[in-house]
Image: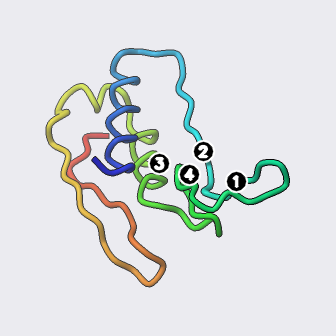
Amino acid sequence: MDQARFLFEQVREARLLGLAGMFMFSWTDEWHTGGHPIQNWAFGITHADRLPKPSYYALQKILECRTEGLLSETQRYRWWFVPTTEGELFRSASVPC
């Protein structure tokens, strides 16, 4: 499962369960340790140059939804990616928010 869909589903489930909070790690792919950049790091929701990844848009979408909207039609999610000159942007349709 790709990062965008995984994060979307995890946050949706946390919200449906009524959890008090969530923690997303990490904001960007850029990471340093001991003064040296980590080259094979790709956990962020933005690239090292801070351009958003599809997971950024997935989190934006699910966090904008009202919880009661998630309850009514949780199986109506469709996923696809729209290529752009900046990379791939996350898109979803039929999200009951």
* Residues under numbered marks 4 and 2 in contact, where contact means CB atoms less than 8 Å apart: yes
Q: Earlier in the sequence, mark 1 or mark 4?
A: 1
First reached walking from the N terminus: tag 3 or tag 1: 1
| Mark closer to the chain start, 4 or 3 | 4
Count all numbered tags in the image, as a single digit.
Answer: 4
- State the residue position of label 1: 31
Residue located 52% across and 16% down the image: 20
The residue lying at 79 percent from left, 58 percent from top is 36
**Residue located beneath label 2 in the image:** 26
Element type at mark 2: loop
Q: x, y percentage for residue 18?
A: 41, 15
Q: CA distance from mark 2 to mark 3?
A: 15 Å
- The residue identified by callout 3 is 60
Q: Nearer the viewer, residue 71 or 86?
A: 86
Q: Residues within 10 Å of mark 1 (few under 14, many from 20)?
A: some
Q: Circles 1 and 2: CB distance less than 8 Å?
A: yes
Q: Residues within 10 Å of mark 2 (few under 14, many from 20)?
A: few
- Mark 1 residue type: Trp
* Horizontal side of residue 46 vs 69, given as left or right: right
- In whole angstroms, how far apart are the C-alphas of marks 1 and 4? 10 Å
